[in-house]
Image (cartoon, grey):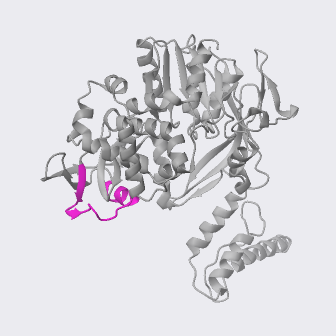
């Protein structure tokens, strides 16, 4: 027995030394608990914890460990790639809301004008709509406190009106043509966030759908709108993904599925620690015979590029517009006990032909996000000839069409950005919200005659922004501080008049009134309509 003990003694001693080293790393000389300097997964020295412990115990001033850790995490992820991010607890709910498809509140869209909260619309399905709150009404009190003239910001209003479902808030409403304030006690609830901005028939055979994001409910909204347009005679579809930043991968694959035969590759993902995962069409799509045009631009990213890339690779749709953003990285969200989370890039996605459309980020995040601005400076937004791809990222579709990876989706039909009518005056009145403010004010003063039109079609055919109305807008803009730019006023008048009419219509007929007017001068939409005619 003694012999066995002597044999095992060196082993026991070694174990004791290891334990001693670990304990020594955990305890300071005055018995203060410290983070271990050994990474127990790799067995390597943990420099990050050592630095944090040194700051906590030795730094000259008192600092917040929480802030140090969060800044360290942010910095680490920032240096990996432009899309790996840390989300603090206080931001996580707000970041997830657009993708979850709902938020909690009273359910109104609002506009602040002259320090007054004006209801633009009560959101369908929300508690404010159920109580009969209408467009044009003013919210002048919240929980007994006057908010009219109190210089509230949009953020202030969100804080006061949003809140946990089931909680109550009392708002004082000043109705049109009344001096009396009516109080409504509203129980906050889940408010739907819609992914489809608008769906309507541009002509007898061509439908149009604008998708703003790929969220939980996007596919259901999309298929419902498609079926409704089909009942109206749709044979051609314009799918507008301009400015769509992406979202859930499954929403994109479900959408593509409706336009493909069964068992066709839509997209696949693969990473160093993630096996290849393939997403294929599961059935014959419901809209196989519908002619399809997909609109993209430099703001179309991620899931938008999956849709455009898959339909382009299968020669199923004509892609129209300008080169897309170029995001081909897949993020996976990991939540932590304190309510924070990280979104870490774990894979790349590839279109059916095998192209990854992710742009290079080797020069860092700042350079990466400056790319879109550089496109404008290089003339790419005005001419496709400014775009240069290499043969190493050239691919061929089954129909023999050449497509490229490594820098976004290149459209089949290039449509330059429209610079006609641009001026410093237009930039000023747009950026300062003067066009929007005047449109709200005009409707406020003319609500009865505008609402007297028998539907949007009657309004669109009859109502025009006359020179007299335009002059009233100019007087309004000058009073608000706009510079009197004679050339800009003349050159930009068609654009401003169109925007004014569209914004007035939006307040009464929502997006179904706004987009048909805006599209009258949209070169990308016009080109899509022409493509169905073989032009």
In the image: residue 186, left or right of residue 221: left
Q: Residue at x 25, y 40 (%)?
A: 446
- Residue 359 to residue 168: above or below: above
Residue 236 location, quadrant: top right
Q: Which residue is drawn at 70% across and 56% down?
A: 366
Of residues 174 and 44, the one nearer the viewer is 174
- Residue 166 to residue 231: above or below: below
- Indicate the position of residue 137 as horizontal and vertical percent values: 23, 47
Of residues 41 and 406, the one nearer the viewer is 406
- Which quadrant is the N terminus positioned in? bottom right
- Indicate the position of residue 521 as horizontal and vertical percent values: 52, 30
Q: Residue at x 67, y 88 (%)?
A: 29
- Residue 269 to residue 375: above or below: above
Q: Is residue 278 visible?
A: no
Of residues 149 and 244, the one nearer the viewer is 149
Q: Is residue 245 magenta?
A: no
């Amino acid at each position: 027995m003694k012999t066995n003990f002597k044999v095992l003694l060196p082993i026991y001693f070694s174990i004791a030394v290891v334990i001693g080293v670990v304990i020594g790393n955990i305890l300071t000389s005055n018995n203060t608990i410290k983070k271990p300097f050994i990474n127990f997964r790799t067995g390597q020295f943990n420099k990050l914890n050592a630095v944090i412990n040194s700051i906590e115990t030795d730094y000259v001033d008192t600092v917040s460990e929480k802030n140090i850790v969060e800044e360290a995490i942010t910095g680490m992820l920032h240096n990996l790639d432009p899309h790996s991010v840390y989300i603090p607890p206080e931001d996580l709910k707000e970041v997830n809301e657009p993708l979850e498809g709902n938020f909690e509140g009273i359910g109104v869209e609002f506009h602040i004008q002259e320090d007054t909260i004006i209801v633009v619309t009560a959101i369908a399905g929300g508690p404010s709509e159920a109580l009969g709150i209408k467009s044009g009404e003013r919210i002048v009190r919240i929980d007994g406190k006057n908010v009219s003239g109190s210089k509230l910001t949009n953020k202030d209003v969100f804080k006061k009106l949003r809140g946990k479902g089931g909680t109550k808030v009392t708002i004082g409403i000043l109705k049109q043509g009344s001096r009396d304030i009516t109080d409504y006690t509203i129980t906050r609830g889940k408010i739907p966030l819609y992914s489809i901005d608008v769906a309507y028939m541009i002509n007898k055979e061509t439908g149009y759908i604008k998708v703003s994001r790929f969220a939980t409910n996007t596919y259901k909204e999309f298929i419902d709108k498609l079926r409704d347009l089909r009942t109206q005679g749709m044979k051609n579809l314009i799918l507008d993904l301009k400015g769509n930043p992406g979202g859930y991968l499954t929403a994109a694959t479900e959408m593509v599925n409706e336009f493909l035969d069964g068992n066709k590759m839509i997209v696949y993902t693969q990473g160093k620690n993630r096996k290849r995962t393939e997403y294929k069409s599961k059935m014959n799509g419901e809209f196989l015979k519908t002619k399809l045009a997909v609109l993209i631009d430099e703001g179309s990213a991620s899931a938008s590029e999956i849709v455009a890339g898959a339909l382009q690779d299968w020669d199923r749709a004509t892609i129209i517009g300008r080169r897309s953003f170029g995001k081909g990285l897949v993020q996976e969200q990991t939540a932590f006990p304190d309510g924070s989370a990280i979104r870490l890039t774990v894979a790349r996605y590839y279109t059916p032909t095998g192209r990854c459309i992710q742009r290079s980020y080797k020069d860092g995040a700042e350079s990466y996000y400056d790319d879109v601005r550089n496109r404008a400076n290089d003339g790419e937004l005005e001419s496709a000839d400014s775009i240069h791809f290499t043969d190493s990222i050239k691919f061929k579709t089954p129909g023999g069409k050449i497509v490229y990876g490594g820098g976004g989706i290149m459209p089949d039909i290039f449509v330059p950005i429209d610079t006609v009518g641009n001026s410093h005056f237009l930039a000023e009145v747009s950026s300062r919200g003067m066009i929007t403010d005047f449109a709200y004010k005009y409707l406020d003063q003319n609500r009865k005659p505008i609402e007297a039109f028998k539907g949007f079609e009657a309004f669109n055919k009859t109502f025009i922004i006359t020179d007299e109305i335009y002059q009233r807008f100019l007087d309004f803009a000058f009073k608000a501080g706009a510079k009197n730019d004679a050339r800009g006023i003349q050159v930009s008048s068609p654009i401003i008049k169109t925007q004014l009419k569209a914004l007035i219509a939006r307040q009464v007929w929502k997006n179904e009134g706004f987009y048909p007017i805006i599209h009258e001068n949209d070169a990308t939409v016009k080109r899509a309509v022409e493509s169905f005619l073989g032009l």
